[in-house]
Amino acid sequence: MGRVQHVGSYYAASSQRAPERPALADGIDCDVCVVGAGIAGCSTALHLALAGLRVVLLEEQRVGWGASGRSGAQAIYGIAAGQSKLARLIGAGAARAVWDVSVEGLALMRELIGRFSIDCDWAAGYLHAAIKERHERELHAEVRELRERYGYTSVRYVPREELRAILATERYRGALYDPNSGHLHPLNYTLGLAAAAEGLGVRIFEGTRATGFAPAGASQVHIRTPQGEVRARYLALCGNVYLGATAPTLASKIMAVATYIVATAPLGAERARQLITNNAAVSDMNWVLDYFRRSADHRLLFGGRVNYSGFSSFDAPSATRARMLAVFPQLQDARIEYAWGGEVDITLNRAPHFGRLAPNVYFLQGFSGHGIALTGIAGKLVAEAISGIAGRFDVFARIPHRNFPGGTALRRPALVLAMLYYRLRDLL
């Protein structure tokens, strides 16, 4: 049986060439074993290697196979839960520390791209667009909060008239603009991080699932794989929804939801530029939101349909195209060349879930759609903690998380009912 390849996305079709790494077939020793070769896992491995540690990175499929390599690719400040909610959960001071980490995550991403010459089409700029009058009020309040409470002065409010000169659509009433956020080619970014980590001595094994792990005393953990074993002083679990039975206590804190994206055929430089004149990434403020951006080769990449039910009976490409045409009806003649989907993890409170399962077993999950920048800085925080500087990691570990209600059988139907409420609210 051949090795599983990346899903048939625009990103996979336009990605840099990457080697197929071997599967682990024997026993191996290292300082740290990292499970999951998305952005979080690759960044963790990279920063551990920069600290001089011997690292093994295990990936069940291919590097960047999961959400990191097929996402909406918008690198955005903050966390999905929002700062006000986070302050209620952990206090204003700790919430400010999380905010500072998220902003540093954007700077770290740009630093890594430059330092390791990662060719991933980085483009600066993000628009958070209002559809309703309620959204406008919320955006004005957010701009004030970010500027006055957090000193984040790069953001500004873009009124309707100015926004219509930027976006060729009548759908939006205004937007928050942040030049510090932006978008990139997520698979190429992930592959670039992996290559940088390998250049520093990290050993990457693809086609190798971590089937389980067990502490072998206070100073070692053994990680089982189908054909081998890793013996490490520390373990970092970065597999998110794909960990499953490998770490069942973590699985109860997150839910996999399916998201879908379409990519048009190349529109030509002029036509693509007219759609989004400043080349920003764009998302709206609905709960079931639309998000879109231009690609480097002048396509429109548009995501918008979220499936919480776990069923795939509806026509996702057609539904996503319909949402695209509701924003840009002038693209009626544009052919959809790629359509794909995949699972991302969300937590009940939409805040990231970091912590330890044992003194030498760390985990990162629950990025809830804000993973492009936050996963990279999260990997740095794990590396800091393993190196003995755990303060920033522990701020995130303080965020409380509950299991999704309903247990194994009813948790998804319960989520569907909750999402129906928010979808109805979108329509009001």
Image (cartoon, helix red, strand yellow):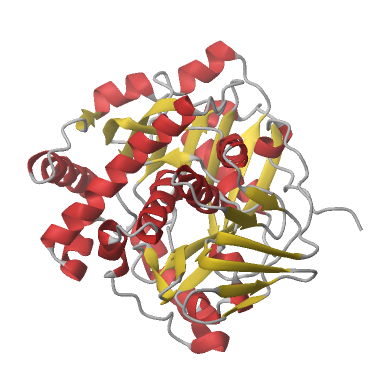
User: Residue 209, relative to residue 106: is it above or below?
Assistant: below
User: What percent of the width, then of the height, locates residue 16?
Assistant: 69, 30
Indicate the quadrant where residue 25 lies: bottom right
Q: Which quadrant is home to the C terminus?
A: bottom left
Depth check, front residue: 4 or 125:
4
Specify whether 90 is left or right of 306: left
User: What percent of the width, then of the height, locates residue 28?
Assistant: 69, 63
User: Residue 263, relative to residue 342: is it above or below?
Assistant: above
User: What percent of the width, then of the height, locates residue 238?
Assistant: 53, 61
Indicate the quadrant where residue 257 lies: bottom right
- Whether residue 427 is visible here, answered yes or no, is no
Specify whether 82 is left or right of 256: left
User: Residue 274, relative to residue 103: is it above or below?
Assistant: above
Q: Residue at x 78, y 44 (%)?
A: 20
User: Residue 159, relative to residue 236: is it above or below?
Assistant: above
Q: Residue at x 60, y 58 (%)?
A: 36
Depth check, front residue: 322 or 153:
153
- Name, please, the residue furthest toward the right: 1
Depth check, front residue: 397 or 313:
397
Specify whether 329 is left or right of 171: right
Q: Residue at x 41, y 68 (%)?
A: 347
User: What percent of the width, then of the height, locates residue 102?
Assistant: 30, 47
Q: Residue at x 73, y 54 (%)?
A: 206
- Whether residue 189 is visible here, answered yes or no, is yes
Q: Which quadrant is home to the N terminus?
A: bottom right
